[in-house]
Image: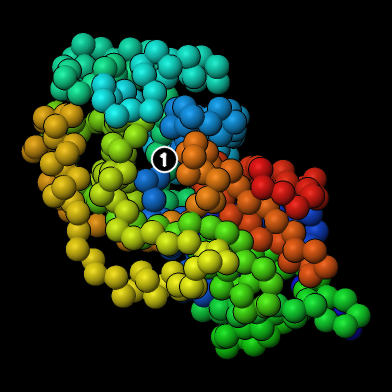
Amino acid sequence: MAPDFDAVVIGGGFFGCSLALHLRRTGRRVVVLEAGSDLMLRASYVNQARVHNGYHYPRSILTGLRSRVNFPRFVEKFRDCVVDDVDTYYAVARRFSNVTARQFETFCRRIEAPLRPAPQSVRGLFNPDLVEQVYRVTEYAFDAVVLRGMVSKALDEAGVEIRFETEAKAVHRMDGGGIAVSCAGSEGDLTASHVYNCTYSHINELLRNSDLPIVPVKHELAEITLIRMPEELSNFAVTIMCGPFFSIMPFPARGLRSLYHVRYTLHDTWYDDAASAYRDPDQVLKSAPKTSHQAHMLKDAVRYIPALERAEYAESLWEVRTVLPRSEGDDSRPILYLEHDGVGLTTIVGAKIDNVFDMVQFESAHAEPTES
């Protein structure tokens, strides 16, 4: 019998939805299975909402170059959700930074990222004992709520079926071809020609239940603090480079600023690998004490930008971030595109929002199993 669908996409985040749209536009019958009540409510929403233009990755020129290529593509395709009216700066710390100001300038020239010294009025906001140089850059934010609306509308117009509150538990190859997907939800099980595992922090939940080898990944329980900026910094976004520092970006979905601190944002880390007992990311997120580190984040940020002493804490957002272990050495952000031999299953993990174009490129080219 013919399968129910040509493709099943498990996970209704930005990557899963974008893949479903791509597959549908190539003529395939597609369904998205989302365990929650709506699309793009988890990691697609709980992040710093940064549209990367390469500056963030001076230790990984490939990641910087890919961001430079994808930045204008994202801005053009998703213009309605892009927020570009904020003055954005990168500052290089004098101590404990992995790069100097000269190295940062060299990196930006190599990837052709626009960079110019900040005006004196802005440099005066920074503590000169801790900050070597400050640069004005071209980098934007996105409104996750507007983006969700754009994606939802595109899925509806393309005729992609979406099944909410439906959790894919396991997959297995059927005799004679096709894949059976076991589901927890009102719609029941289904079959497909191919299945895409786009569940981000939960990729190994599906693989374990399907008796497939897990993918080695690192999980991080992260707190993103939302703050109100003082008047003199109301149009200001900044990233302190490159080490145990912080960044402040617009969070347009709430009309606030997000504060992410390398030292204090992460409350817990663990690995999915052969040597570690499996921990369900949802259970970790649900059961972990939500004791905010916001006071530590702001206190440290004030050392670099004294005017932040007048910033006000609003709330914290919590989520599990998932990264590939190879990123720990050079802070690179590759995507994972892995085809499981003989199963008809592909696992995909994107590290930042502009990776979505690389994912579509891999799928279009029917890439060999690879991390890239």
Name which residue type carries label 1: Arg
Q: Quadrant of residue 158?
A: bottom right
Quadrant, the N terminus: bottom right
Q: Is residue 138 left or right of residue 208?
A: left
- Observer able to see residue 96: yes
Q: Residue at x 67, y 47 (%)?
A: 371
Q: Quadrant of residue 83?
A: top left
Q: Position of residue 301 (x, y in %)?
A: 18, 37
Residue furthest to the left in view is: 310
Q: Quadrant of residue 74?
A: top right
Q: Residue at x 43, y 56 (%)?
A: 321
Q: Position of residue 126 (x, y in %)?
A: 18, 22
Residue furthest to the right in view is: 176
Considering only vertical position in the picture, is 1 above or below 113? below
- Observer able to see residue 148: no
Residue furthest to the front in view is: 275
Q: Position of residue 152 (x, y in %)?
A: 54, 60
Q: Residue at x 63, y 51 (%)?
A: 336
**Disc 1 secondary structure class:** strand
Q: Residue at x 14, y 32 (%)?
A: 303
Q: Is residue 84 left or right of residue 216?
A: left
Considering only vertical position in the picture, is 61 above or below 372? above
> Between residues 1 and 85, which one lies in front from this camera angle?
1
Residue hosting label 1: 50
Quadrant, the C terminus: top right
Q: Is residue 297 left or right of residue 34?
A: left
Type of colouring:
rainbow
Q: Is residue 15 left or right of residue 288?
A: right
Considering only vertical position in the picture, is 324 above or below 120? below
Considering only vertical position in the picture, is 119 above or below 174? above
Q: Position of residue 148 (x, y in %)?
A: 48, 56
